[in-house]
């Protein structure tokens, strides 16, 4: 069975920001759609069948990330909107990142793949990413196109940069997350993205999927303060974070 891609368009950070902003202001789905349609019409040109044009696909992605999220991600989204209103603009990238990987596993796989490469080397090429992605998603042209577009998203979002030599990507200075509630929220997003009920805290917080970020100091209690998470011991020194059975 082929894995679903879903996140197959180049999505600008400013579009995500506008979508979340409208939602946080209490706008209805129709009002949000009207505003986004106007923005996307100006910046994108649909080709071929208008129902499956680039504008419509972009709208679908934006809505799934912030507006019409799957039922299992609703609690995460509700908190994301609360944090969006509260945290500085500088930290909004954290919310867009976590929300994207929670509803689009392909996005999370791309982030993890890039993160693994950057742990091994100082730069990478699209070909190196594609080789690893195709092992999981198959030798499909749609996979190639989607992967390249997500890489460009990473540049647009400021979490990667282009090297002087064309076709080479470089890391940027990591974004430090000091807000403990955001850290706990992001841990939950990682569990959802990986379709995991639980994981070692030491592994999750060092996950390559977090390559654009550095987590500040936090305690197990900070994670437990997220009402959908629970912490327990495994062995002598290992701590596990898990989704509560009624938390999603």
Image: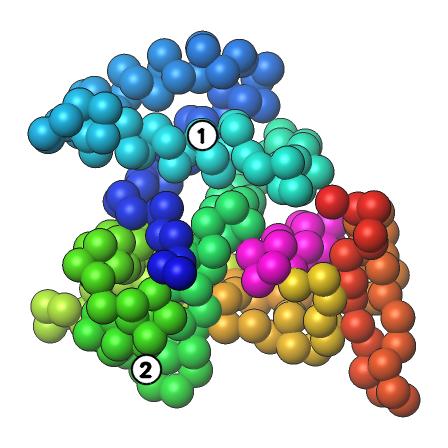
Q: Measured from the top left, where is residue 211 in percent x and y?
A: 47, 68
Q: Quadrant of residue 186?
A: bottom right
Count of labels shown?
2
193 above or below 128?
Answer: above
Residue 227 falls inside the magenta stretch: no
Q: Is residue 21 above or below residue 190?
A: above
Q: Is residue 48 left or right of residue 38?
A: left
In the image, is residue 191 part of the stretch drawn in magenta? Answer: yes
Q: Which residue occupies the foreground of this view, 88 or 206?
A: 206
40 and 132: which one is in front? Answer: 132
Label 1 environment density (alpha carbons within 10 Å; few <14, some 14–19, many ≥20): some
The residue positioned 58% from the left and 23% from the top of the image is: 24
Q: With respect to residue 39, does 34 lie above or below?
A: above
Separation (CA) of disc 2 from disc 1: 35 Å
Q: Is residue 80 visible?
A: no
- The stretch of residues the image draws in magenta is 180-195
- The location of residue 188, given as percent across then percent down, is 68, 55
Q: Which residue is depicted at the point 45% across and 10% down?
A: 31
Q: In the rendered image, is residue 245 in sight?
A: yes
């Amino acid at each position: 069975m082929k894995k679903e891609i879903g996140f197959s368009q180049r999505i600008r950070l400013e579009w995500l920001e506008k979508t979340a902003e409208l939602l946080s202001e209490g706008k209805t789905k129709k009002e949000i759609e009207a505003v986004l349609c106007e923005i996307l019409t100006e910046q994108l040109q649909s080709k071929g069948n208008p129902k499956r044009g680039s504008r419509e696909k972009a709208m679908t992605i934006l809505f799934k990330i912030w507006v019409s999220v799957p039922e299992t991600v609703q609690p995460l989204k509700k908190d994301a909107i609360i944090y969006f209103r509260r945290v500085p603009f500088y930290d909004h990238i954290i919310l867009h990142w976590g929300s994207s990987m929670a509803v689009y596993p392909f996005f999370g796989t791309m982030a993890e793949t890039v993160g693994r490469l950057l742990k091994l080397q100082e730069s990478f090429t699209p070909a190196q990413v594609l080789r690893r992605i195709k092992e999981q998603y198959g030798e499909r042209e749609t996979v190639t196109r989607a992967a390249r577009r997500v890489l460009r998203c990473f540049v647009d979002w400021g979490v990667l940069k282009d090297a002087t030599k064309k076709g080479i990507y470089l890391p940027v200075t990591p974004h430090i997350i000091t807000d403990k509630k955001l850290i706990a929220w992001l841990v939950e997003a990682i569990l959802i993205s990986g379709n995991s009920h639980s994981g070692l805290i030491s592994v999750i917080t060092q996950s390559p999927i977090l390559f654009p970020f550095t987590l500040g100091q936090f305690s197990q209690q900070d994670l437990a303060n997220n009402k959908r998470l629970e912490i327990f011991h495994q062995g002598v020194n290992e701590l596990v974070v898990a989704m509560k059975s009624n938390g999603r």
